[in-house]
Image (cartoon, grey):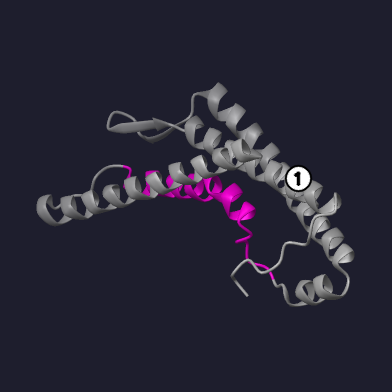
Amino acid sequence: MRGWAKLGDGLAVLSTLLIAALMVLICADAFARNIFGGSLPLVSELGASLLVVIVYLALATTIRHNRLARTDVFMAWLAAERPRAAALLSAVYDLIGAVLLALIGWAGVLTLARDFAGGKYLGIQGVLTFPLWPFGAAFVIGLAVACIQFLLQALHALRGGAARIGGGLE
């Protein structure tokens, strides 16, 4: 489990580094607009693609640290009154999350395969282009790790673990 946590945290670190890269890109674009009177090419397209990657690379760690937004008013009461029922409900929540992420991930795999096979690029030919598949691959990897994280949590809850409540957002 420690290795799995390191994988999820490593993806979150990569997500943080991409945030820093996006900030540098945006600042460079603002600098170019003010000094040279023109924008850098592909900043908005690259920024939009990076935002998706940033979110999904950090998703597994968000799930593991119980930082997804949800209401725990009922779960806190249920955990105090009927801890086994709360753990079961928590497992159901995690299983539903895993199924939803798996469905989104499957659509991402299909898109990734199409982008890779078709040699799709982002940008303006002759000016600056980037292949789309690395963004799709990062998206699918983030979803896969997050899906497995949900499954691990559901398994833990079903094996007698406690319900996951109180993620700090209440």
Residue 86: name its quadrant. bottom right
Q: Viewer-proximal residue, 150 or 79?
A: 79
Residue at the image position 81 percent from the left and 53 percent from the top: 157
The residue that disc 1 covers is 151
**Viewer-side residue, 70 vs 83:** 83
Residue 62 on image: x %, y %: 58, 54
The answer to if 139 sits in the magenta stretch is no
Could you tell me which residue is drawn at 75 percent across and 45 percent down?
151
Residue 5 showing in the rendered view: yes
* Residues in magenta, as a range: 42-70
Residue extending farthest left: 35
Which quadrant holds the C terminus? bottom right
Give percent across and percent down for residue 88: 86, 59
Left or right of 92: which side holds 68? left
Left or right side of 136 for 123: left
Residue appearing at x 70%, y 72% in the figure? 71
Q: Residue at x 57, y 50 (%)?
A: 61
The quadrant where residue 103 appears: top right
Q: Give the dominant element type of the magenta stretch: helix, strand or loop.
A: helix
Tell me if residue 32 comes above or below residue 170 in the rendering.
above
Is disc 1 surrounded by few (<14), some (14 to 19) or many (20+) residues within 10 Å?
some
